[in-house]
Image (cartoon, helix red, strand yellow):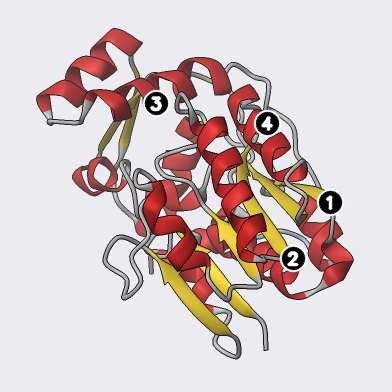
Amino acid sequence: MKNIFVLGANGKTGRRVAARLQTFNVRLGSRNAPIPFDWEDSHTWAPALQDMDAVYISFQPDLAVPGADHTIAAFSKTALAAGVQKLVLLSGRGEPEAERCEQAVIQSGIDWTIVRASWFMQNFTESYMAEPIQAGFVALPVGEVGEPFIDADDIADVAVAALTDNKHSQKIYEVTGPALLTFRDAVAEIAKVTGKHIQYEAISMDDYTTQLALHGVPPDITNLLTYLFTEVLDGRNATVANGVEQALGRKPTDFHAFLKKSMQ
């Protein structure tokens, strides 16, 4: 059996990846695990990587944060020394900083697969937009830019395939949902499926950061969200990719089907 180390084991994709690997020996990567792992403490890396054959890398909070590429490079070096044979990196679509992290993995000397994902559908149900949606009012600093939101379950399926089958070696899968939706479209679809009235308002970035501060959001997370909303959502990702189909031989989950399974 392969011994697989799943980082971000409590996150949107990590816990889904771990759940799909029940027939393997899985080690969960978190600060509270029996063998703790902490991205901010490199002394925890080697013990957590001991005896692991493959690693799913989900970096927190995001590969776009300053210095993430150096951290990923150092981690990859530690993984190589520990005898790890495969790295599967969850990356962000349209993020130059994330692409530098991809290169650190590609040049690590270890077999690799990159899963380069668009925005998660689960951001509407499990993350920072869930509470405003429940409250019936969503205000975001983004207008009519289309985004091919992807189901985290599809990401997990691709990641597990890459971790367990060598045919995915040295491939970059750009994974998205099957259609472009604006955030306004997505909120309207949620309202339709749930039968709730939910208002969407496009606001300025200044107003958005003010609201984040009022809700006690840490400055580093505010900076990350500012980057994502102002740069990544500038239209560069307003196309659909076929990474799910390439990896799995099936279509990705559409937003309506996602909502039906997760909100009813």
Disc 1 secondary structure class: strand
Going by the picture, which residue comes out furthest to the front?
Answer: 81
Q: Nearer the viewer, mark 3 or mark 4?
A: 4
Work out whether mark 3 precedes mark 4 in sequence or the reverse, and give the earlier one: 4
CA separation in Å, label 1 and label 4: 14 Å
Q: Which residue corresponds to mark 2?
A: 162
260 is higher (above) or lower (below) than 145: below
Q: In this picture, is 8 found above or below 132? A: below
Which quadrant holds the N terminus?
Answer: bottom right
**Mark 2 element type:** helix
Residue 235 in the image: x percent, y percent? 64, 19
Residue hosting label 1 = 171
**Residue 62 screen position, x and y as percent:** 46, 37
**Along the polypeptide, which appears first: circle 3 or circle 2?**
2
Q: Residues under labels 3 and 2: Cα distance? A: 28 Å
Q: Provide the secondary structure element on which disc 3 rests.
A: helix
- Amino acid, disc 3: Leu
Q: Tell me the residue that label 3 is attached to.
A: 224
Answer with mark 1 or mark 4, whichever residue precedes in sequence. Answer: 4
Residue tagged by mark 4? 99
Q: Residue at x 60, y 86 (%)?
A: 24
Q: Residues within 10 Å of mark 1 (few under 14, many from 20)?
A: some
**Amino acid marked by disc 2:** Ala
Q: CA distance from mark 4 to mark 2?
A: 19 Å
**Callout 1 touching callout 2 (CB < 8 Å):** yes
Sequence-wise, the earlier of marks 1 and 2 is 2
Instruction: State how far apart marks 3 and 4 are (Cα).
Output: 16 Å
Query: Contact (CB < 8 A) between labels 3 and 4?
Result: no
Residue kind at label 1, given as amino acid type: Lys
Q: CA distance from mark 1 to mark 3?
A: 27 Å
> Label 4 sits on what residue type?
Glu
